[in-house]
Image (cartoon, helix red, strand yellow):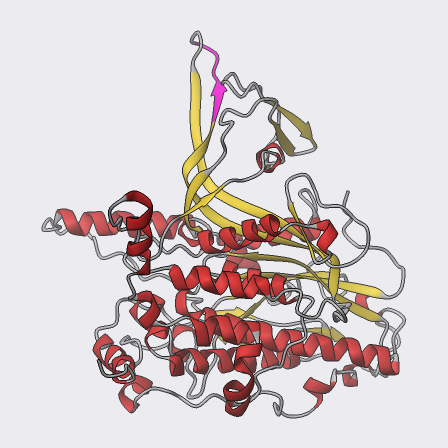
Amino acid sequence: MFTDLPGDAHPRIFEIGLVLAGAVSAGAYTGGVLDFLFEALDALADNRANDGRGLHEVRLKVITGASAGGMTAAITAAAAKRRFPHIRTDNDAASKGADNPFYNAWVLQIDIRSLLDTADLAATKAAFGKPVLQSLLDCSVLDTIVTTTLGARNNDSADPPDRPWLADRVHLCFTTTNLRGVTYAFPFSGSQGALYSMTRHNDVARFSLHVRGSSTPRPDEIDLSFVPAGTTDSDWSSMGQAALATGAFPVALRARAIKPIAELYAASWFNKQGTATLTSSVKSEFTTEGQLIHLDDDTPSQPDLQYIAIDGGMINNEPLELARIELAGILGHNPQTAQSACRAVIMVDPFPATPDPGTLTGTGNETVWAVMGGMMTAFTNQNRFHPEDIRLALDESVYSRFMISPSGPNAKEGAQAIAGGALHGFSGFLDKSYRHHDFMLGRLNCYNFLKYYFTIPIPEPTDNSTPMPWLFSGEPRTLNEDLPPHLRTGPRHTAVPSSPCSARQRRNPHPRDGPSTHSIPTACAVPSAAGSTRSSTPISRPWPPPRGASAWVWHGLRSFPAA
């Protein structure tokens, strides 16, 4: 089904998968990254069309997202066929912000004022006869954002942009935490009717964005089309609901109902050896292809597959594996060397932090509340424990995984570089200036990533003995000068954001000791001269509830209108 290399035909195509990690209010940062990525890839496509330089092309094939990252993935899908202005300066934000889908959703529409409203209580009272508290914050504004964002997807249907850098079908995967769960059972020999039962709560909602061509989606995907005859509003509404579900931060934001298609579970796989037959009511059978086991459901054990979902980041906050599988296939892999690289996963993570060690060291005076808190921390950290992903990210010889994370002035990195990182990521909702800062920082960091890090080394022009990497085979050895217009000069296409914070906040926005010495390497698919070294983006230490949070809250409350 998939091969390690896509072949020798020209143009060579470098496939990209985006992994948008959870971010809470720092989704504004991810939105800024996507805004500049749209702008840069549009410019690259125009450059290719106008002067014909270069034989390689870029294709965005898959976007996976968790929490705020999933919500940004939905905005990306709705923006695929839209023309919209990009937010390069503060003046652009003031005059064009409402027309930019990323800026409008993450900076203008969401705010603490609307989240503290009571429209949700009024709605439940009208529906059930009494108010029902479904979350601490009013999520009505989130419903409005989804409606307006998805409703604008056909704004340019008369003359839509082609965007050749989008694959004919872009796969979308939203992680969710399924509170109902999907049950399975295995028989064991040695006891009559003995079963080993288990329940899976790590779920995913899959969609296929039909950009062009006549291909059809897989059975486990819901089809999304821009052609009125090829889709229904319910398909896009299902995606909007999945985006809200993956972003449903527990307790703070309302859980959402998801009704998946039955084929989603029929297409599930477990990467193990051997065969097994289930004796539960599912009457399912595993069939083996190599090391791949498919689960085929004849009669689902849960005919009504609907479930209540909360934040996908509770279990899978960085769905790297989902993106890798969509790029390389279930049994495939992405070539990792510079010579063979043809696909890459790029993770956008506003909070690339390593958790602090637990504080429960067995002193004997731990309270029941401390143990309960430690239990939840252990649950979350274990679900996010992916040592193989970390190993690949730290290996500078791997050209199939990259990362974009906040990098600000004064060597501030990670959560310390953004304004929305305090209060466990909720501080950005307190004031628009925080979200604007993070959006502009996302644009700037994406610019730097594409120009300096997302590179593949090529031989020196005078080195005729070393072959060109697969991606650049047949292209001139002076290719390192071949950059799209946005990357040839200084960052005039995006402004360095000014800090919206006080001097005290800038000195210590997240009270801690400073950045860690660990680093995540970054790099990319425009060429670099041989011998260049790949830089590293330091990852900051994690952000606990900041002891100086009062300064952040006060800054936001000062802008509230008088009662």
Tell me where residue 83 appears, x and y as whole percent. Answer: 68, 75
Specify the segment rendered in magenta.
184-190
Tell me the quarter of the picture where residue 63 sits.
bottom right
Instruction: Tell me residue 42's x, y (percent).
Output: 72, 76
- Residue 187, magenta (yes or no): yes
Identify the residue at image location x=72%, y=67%.
157
Q: In the image, what residue occupies the spot 87% across and 73% down? A: 465
- Location of the N terminus (image quadrant): top right
- The residue that appears at 88% across and 76% down in the rendered structure is 464
Taking the spot 34% from the left edge, 69% from the top edge, the residue there is 114
Is residue 18 placed above or below 294 in the rendered structure? below
On the picture, is 484 further left or further right than 93?
Answer: right
Residue 433 % position (x, y): 39, 83
Q: Can residue 243 be seen at all in this image of the molecule?
A: yes
- Residue in the foreground of this view, choosing between 298 and 545: 298
* In the image, residue 242 above or below residue 509: above
Q: Is residue 125 above or below residue 192?
A: below
Q: Confirm whether the magenta stretch covers residue 133.
A: no
